[in-house]
Image (cartoon, grey):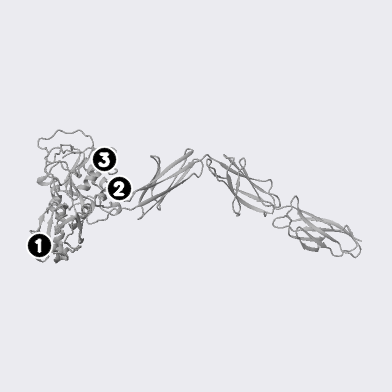
Amino acid sequence: MKLRKPLAGVAAAVVATSILAFAQPALAANSTPTTTHDANDPSFDDTLAVHTLDSDLIGGGSDTSQGVMHLLGEAWNGAATPPANRVASFAATGGGTLGLPNTAPTRPNGSGAGLNTLHAGGNNTDFDFARASRPINATETSDGLQMFPFALDQIKVVVSGNTASNAPLSLTVDQIVAIYKCDPAADNWTEVGGSTSGTIVPLFPQPSSGTGATFFAALKTANGNVDVAPPACGTQVQENDPSQIKDNVNAIAPYSEGLAGLTNGLVRIVNGWGQPRALYNVVRGSDLSDGTKGPILQSVFGKDGFVCSNAATDIISAAGFHQLARPSSGGVCGVQTQAASSNFTTNAKVTTSTTVTGTNPSAGAVHLVASVTGSATPNGSIEFFEGDQSVGGGPLSSGGLTLDLADVALGSHTYTAKFTSNTGQDASEATTEVVVKSPSSAAVTFSATPAYGKANSVIVTVTGSDTGNVSIKVGSAAAVTKALSSGKATLVLPTNKPAGSYPIVAKFLGTDSVAGSTAPAKSLVIAKATPVISETFPAATAVGAAGKGVVKVAIAGSTVKPTGTVKIFMGTKLLKQVTLANGQVTVTLPKLTKGSHTLTIKYLGSTNVKAGNKSFTITQK
């Protein structure tokens, strides 16, 4: 058993090629290769002259998944920190023998051939995994092999796409069964819906291949569980090879739907029947239980490994397949099993769009707000960066994330919000610029002893800036903007502003270089005015004449005229009750008895002016 070195890193993106320099072991006597390099062989093994190492994860097998595993292997091997355990996935096609660290085996072509390298008589410890496009059989299960599903494919039948095939656009499974049973009633295209006569040429891959095994198993099920053998009327070909199909107007063959889509129209997929299947990477159970090798295999193929990671999603898609969803998303990608996968939930790609805004709410502070939208609900996390430096982040919450930064240096800062999905959705990012400004503070003062009838003022003083604007809101009135002059702004209130308590909200709105600030909460209290009462009654009246005069109520130093009620008493006797108009009222007193009388004017006050009184003397002659 080979023991692997610990993994040094995980690839994070697709790389076209990565030629890595490793010390080469001595060539074993029986390991001389007799084949040339294939495009789907590992790029670092460019001559197959024993460039693989004992520490590499070496695999082969399925033709269907040779392309996708080549791309995944290249991405893994191309990590920024080269892994100690490279993935060396060798193509099924190309023939000849491979130069491995200790042996020169025949290149395994197909799922069955790949699986045979891991157990029983064909067991070769140079191989660590097999690509398989079919589940393991009873013998392979009893020999302890374990599968890691990772991608969804579907077997369809294809016909020539390079020329006008005689095949119809669609075939039922019963028609396909009849064709592959060499049924005389289904040996011409016109007998199964074709518009042009032509003898059908059924092609099929080697039955031990994953495509062949899955295809014939599906035909058996459709045939009442009776085997459909490879047809005597047909021809065996390399699986998923368009060369014998593309120019034959009468040919039909089972084919990987994913690979058929990459032939640039050389083959045409026939509508109708299809058989979904998982693609697997298969390993020895004994290797998984090995304390050194097991974690390495899990790191590449397991549910938390590279093949099931977000970094692999686009790679698998580029190869024509769909990455199976991870268990956290209801799927089975990377779940170790010996049973055929029937859960085909995939990591459906979701196009996302990220936006970000930033503000400088106070000195040295930055407030970032990012939001993510998508063709489906985005699921993942946001990380904020300034340049290459992460400044914080976390999982999405209601489609977004906020971040508050403190002690940020003065000046301009550019922040990028990067969305990363944990279910294979598209990543997206957005950038914003925030200018962090110098601090300021604001304070509110009032004119001396604010009172009704006076010219009361709200004064805002800003420390940190001599210029700029302040917003002043008095009570429920709309905010008023005033410009600073030498760091101060004054709002003069109307002299008839009613008495009462008014909360003041004063804000410095900031400048290009100075941050805004809000003054501490404060209330303006306008006191009731003290009345000044005067009268013009005569000092004496003639016998039988009534006294007549004007009563005035004023506010000292103010042009505001009080309102309210005035009463005139003689002792406790009410002589007259009148109402002020524009601060005064003319009063005619009742006739008084002969003699001197002291009268009292009582002003009852109002919501804005205090009550008051004044006495005067009048003599009735």
Query: Label 2, on which residue?
Result: 310
Question: Disc 3 residue type?
Answer: Gly
Mark 2 vs mark 1: in front: 1
Residue 454, how many percent across, how many down?
Answer: 70, 50
User: Which numbered circle lies on residue 182?
Assistant: 1
Q: Quadrant of residue 293?
A: top left
Question: What is the C-alpha distance between the residues marked 2 and 1?
Answer: 46 Å
Residue lying furthest left: 232
Residue density around tag 3, few if under 14, some if 14–19, many if 20 or more, within 10 Å = many
* Residue situated in front as seen by the camera: 139 or 270: 270
* Residue situated in front as seen by the camera: 606 or 290: 606
Q: Is residue 7 above or below residue 245?
A: above
Is 506 positioned to the left or the right of 453 in the image? left
Residue 577, how many percent across, how many down?
Answer: 78, 63
Residue density around tag 2, few if under 14, some if 14–19, many if 20 or more, within 10 Å = many
Question: Disc 2 residue type?
Answer: Asn
Mark 2 vs mark 3: in front: 3
Residue density around tag 1, few if under 14, some if 14–19, many if 20 or more, within 10 Å = many
SS under mark 2: helix
Q: Is residue 380 above or below residue 37?
A: below
Count of numbered tags: 3
Asked whether disc 1 touches disc 3, contact meaning CB atoms under 8 Å apart, the reply is no
Question: What is the C-alpha distance between the residues marked 1 and 3?
Answer: 49 Å
Is 577 positioned to the left or the right of 145 in the image? right
Question: What is the C-alpha distance between the residues marked 2 and 3?
Answer: 16 Å
Question: Disc 1 residue type?
Answer: Cys
SS under mark 3: loop
Could you tell me which quadrant the N terminus lies in? Answer: top left
* Residue situated in front as seen by the camera: 343 or 418: 418
Query: Label 3, on which residue?
Result: 78
Residue 219, how many percent across, how many down?
Answer: 14, 60
User: Mark 2 or mark 3: which comes first in sequence?
Assistant: 3
